[in-house]
Amino acid sequence: MVMGINGKFPGPTIRVKVGDIVRVDVTNKLNTEGVVIHWHGIKQRETPWSDGTASISQCAIAPGETFTYRFTADKAGTYFYHGHYGMQRSAGLYGSLIVDVADGEKEPFEYDGEFCLLLSDYWHQNVHQQEVGLSSLPFRWINESQSLLMNGRGQYNCSLASRYNESATLPQCAPNVLSVFPNRTYRLRIASTTSLASLNLAIGNHKMYVVEADGNYVNRTEVTDIDIYSGESYSVLFTADQIPYDNFWISAGVRARLPQTPQALALLNYIPTPESKFPLSPPPVTPRWDDYGRSKSFALNITAAAGTPRPPKSHERRIVLLSTQNKFNGHSVWAINNVSLSLPVTPYLGAIRYDIKDAYDQTPPPENFPDWYNVSAPPANPNTNVGDGAYVLVNGTTVDIILQNANMLEPGASEVHPWHMHGHDFWVLGYGEGRFAEEDEKRFNLTTAPLKNTAVIFPFGWTALRFVADNPGVWAFHCHIEPHLHMGMGVVIAEGLDQIRAMNVSRDALSCGLTGKMFAAEDARRRN
Amino acid sequence: MVMGINGKFPGPTIRVKVGDIVRVDVTNKLNTEGVVIHWHGIKQRETPWSDGTASISQCAIAPGETFTYRFTADKAGTYFYHGHYGMQRSAGLYGSLIVDVADGEKEPFEYDGEFCLLLSDYWHQNVHQQEVGLSSLPFRWINESQSLLMNGRGQYNCSLASRYNESATLPQCAPNVLSVFPNRTYRLRIASTTSLASLNLAIGNHKMYVVEADGNYVNRTEVTDIDIYSGESYSVLFTADQIPYDNFWISAGVRARLPQTPQALALLNYIPTPESKFPLSPPPVTPRWDDYGRSKSFALNITAAAGTPRPPKSHERRIVLLSTQNKFNGHSVWAINNVSLSLPVTPYLGAIRYDIKDAYDQTPPPENFPDWYNVSAPPANPNTNVGDGAYVLVNGTTVDIILQNANMLEPGASEVHPWHMHGHDFWVLGYGEGRFAEEDEKRFNLTTAPLKNTAVIFPFGWTALRFVADNPGVWAFHCHIEPHLHMGMGVVIAEGLDQIRAMNVSRDALSCGLTGKMFAAEDARRRN
């Protein structure tokens, strides 16, 4: 069972142009569940209530209700949209979102055609059971997914056979076919909305050239394969230059976790080769899951294209965020600077707009972690706190965030976490090993740092980000691994409080919690 | 997976006294689902917003929110509470609710001790998948349950063995034990909150005496077993009069559908016989599922105890409700007088209170069905309509409802449906075969008609009910089979519109739909 949109899974691809004001009416036809849709990579300037994050930018849309998202498509690129309530993204609530350049503008590279590949992972166990397992004592992990999907299609048992087996009756289970004309160049828009898996994608026998990352142009880089983490998107160009004309596999496999899931496959079909012809070469082999050196060099090779704004030379504020695996009342959680995020009922945006102080903890969480904390060993005290405080940023501030990884509860273990920021791109200034130190700042890349909205922290390492707090609103910043966010691995950034208080925040988004009570009570006062 | 309350499944037994003002704070700790709790059998006089029916009496309580139910325990008896949103009752959201006589009052029968047996059925497939299957093309029926439960415990595979097998480690899976002293008399409070199953319950080697039905005293009737339909409750007395002292099985099995589910079992244990002693006699055998003659004679034997108010001699209004199985755009549905109920977003109670006309269809549904309709054959035209109109009753009116059963889509098939009314008890005036005719009224029982809140229609038959519309509010009246209600088998009764408009309806219950929008907009008007 999956969650669909307009009868489709994945949801329909939305395609707009830069400058378009995009309006999406989302009607919740679920039986008993609320829903929101987040427009991943869209900045939501002046429309923070359209960011689609439950408890942060709005109340969940109740069954039967319609909420209208309205936002400006601010930057050309490859994006996607997805549910951002509970683990509904993992339930299948996602689709592609493509922003083309404005009329009269051109992309800074040429191609003859394009394809979208939206990558995801799929469990047979429904997300309600997954959620309950993650919150239970004893803890029940979701384990590895049963399938990896490309545009919603995966391999399991004999589903691969359906294209090649006359008796198979489910063509919708067969891999996607990308049909190309020989010697033409194509843009492949790849985005990952996986719940858990970090992936590596390759096209058999074809080189690729990375040209875009998270909606930002990057220096054209030749690669044989790309690493892509949940929350990221890339465009690559490839030319159909193989002789003889044939069919080839496009494969995506698991990285950074011991793989237990078959590769996702799509078919690259050279016209006029029949689609049914089995490729001569097997699917590309995914690099070894724990070859982090390879992953790091891929990440470092992604640099900003000429014309990309450079980061400010220095920061005005630095926030260091230590990610740790912990226990809270015996439950397994993730914490940031010893606070595991538990979202409040009243959306932050409404609480700030209407100055409701008891909607969330008014004390911001810590901006660093103690000097004595050893990131190379399991936490000395595994217990942590749960909280819903927000980091408050003054409008216009240049902020550095140091994402610091650490050892998990198990000795010698540390995992990859792709951190995604809402409302912003940030410059990725650098990656490092061990604990971030002041002198590491000297190695920051201030010239070709790429702009991204999602950046990974490698095991036992750190990642340095810089951004300008120029977008008033309340923004989630979190690990994009769905069960990790569910277990508290995120923070909330409240940016430009004065500006928010002057905003005409959509009231449709605030009918829950203390804002909802305020509306009902004020009406009562007027009527009585 | 089940839905629990305060960490328990079934939820905790709530025990109050007549005249108590009961306050229950329900906090929704589900991840993404709304919730409501219905207090089954409680009249909710002057508190219709506490009836706990989503879309009728209130908006669903959103995750993280708390709603306070406050109502008067109006009548001593055996009741239960349960979810009334989507199919959450079937997910396990239920518990017992016992109302004792007021201090200084006495029950009109004597007993030395008592037990509650709350009966239910349980599927391994979660209710989300069940709901989706029922709404899908092609239709996927939920099929028979995997287990029948008594107080949440059932038999499946080896769970029965856990009491008798040293190696078994799950005593919570073993049957309930009802320990009695020899020669004492006990009250067994039996209620059925099954999603689908009609049940028959018996105590091996023991006679029972029915003394209460749906919170109303009935003439003491000796029986060997009782039929109990979903939504009903009975109290029976039994005396531990067996020699030798031993253990005996209490069994409940499926009636009115071809059984494919093991009996539910509980153990009647004579103190000091060890609980672990296996009963000498096997569990009572459930009567043949399709012996409707037996069921009808059981139903007819239930008559009002002396002192029960008699029905008014005549009705002022008659509503005939024909239940049919139909198609709507190819989907399988149930319809009443050719309307399949689809609940609106805005609760009726709020829409009426604030005079919002576009919240639901202001044209009430038909009060009868055409003369030419043949209840003994499949519908000539299987297609029906979907609607959300309400029957409007003027306060004080005496209303007869004739529930008319009919042939289903399949020739020669008709099923049992237990109809439950919110906000009222009704007198059950009679049952009949075939189509109700005017002359049938002469056979109405106007002297000993029992008061109930749930009454069954037998296959191809009719059931006549009478009640006085003396409880302003909006009340569901529906088949208590969960998938049937989900498929539209219910009606809405709006009673005493003028009285509702003058009510101080709890605004906490109305933050959704058009009432929610009104609250938000009025606040906006005040602030701007």
Image: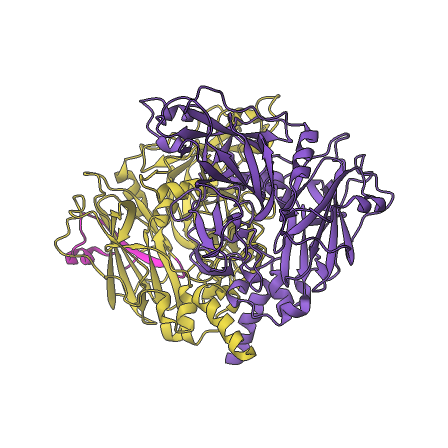
Chain colours: A yellow, B purple
Can residue A104 be seen here? The reply is no
Q: Is residue B234 left or right of residue A499?
A: right
A209 versus A174 height, above or below: below
In the foreground, A291 or A367: A367
Task: Tell me which segment is drawn in magenta.
Answer: A422-448
Magenta run includes residue A11:
no
Picture quarter with the C terminus of chain A: bottom right
Count of residue discs? 0
B238 versus A189 height, above or below: above
In the foreground, B195 or B216: B216
Residue A183: percent from the left, percent from the top? 52, 37
Magenta run includes residue A445:
yes
Residue A322: percent from the left, percent from the top? 23, 53
A351 versus A373 height, above or below: below
List the single residue furthest toward the left. Answer: A372
Residue A387: percent from the left, percent from the top? 30, 58
List the single residue furthest toward the right. Answer: B372
Can residue B25 be seen here? The reply is yes
Examine the image and state in which quarter residue A401 appears: bottom left
List the single residue furthest toward the top. Answer: B280
In the foreground, B320 or A155: B320
Residue visible at 18% across and 55% down in the picture: A440
